[in-house]
Image (cartoon, rainbow, N blue to C red):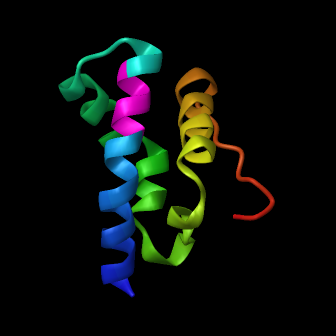
Amino acid sequence: MADDNKAMLEFIVPRMIKAMMEDRNVSEKEAFTLLYSSRLYEQLDREETKMWHLSVPTLYEMFKEEQNTGKITYPEEA
């Protein structure tokens, strides 16, 4: 199962980075730093949360909420 999680992260992370670069006008390096230091990524990286099944737009909205408020609201489906 951990392999499924890693495979999904390989799909999710580049799309999250691209969204951050476009939306926040940051460099790729800065976007990686922001994502990898977030609580959201910590949750994504944990197999048992199954958060990787959420869409990239949903995950990005959750990331923005964490950045803006320090909190993460989990969708009903999570």
Location of residue 76 in the rendering, given as x and y in whole percent from the top left corner = 81, 60
Image quadrant of residue 19? top left
Query: Against 36, is 68 above or below?
Result: above
Nearest the viewer among 2 and 10 is: 10
- Residue that lies at the very extreme toward the top in this rendered image: 25
Q: In the visual, does 61 lie left or right of 75?
A: left
x and y, in percent, of residue 18 in the image: 36, 32
Q: Nearer the viewer, residue 38 or 11?
A: 11
Position of residue 47 measured from the top left corner of the image (x, y, whole percent): 44, 75
Predominant secondary structure in magenta?
helix
Segment colored magenta: 16-21
Q: Quadrant of residue 53?
A: bottom right
Residue drawn 53% across the image and 37% down it: 63
Instruction: Please identify the residue farthest to the right as the structure is shown.
Output: 76
Quarter of the figure that contains the C terminus: bottom right
- When the figure is inspected, residue 46 is found, relative to residue 59, above or below; the finding is below
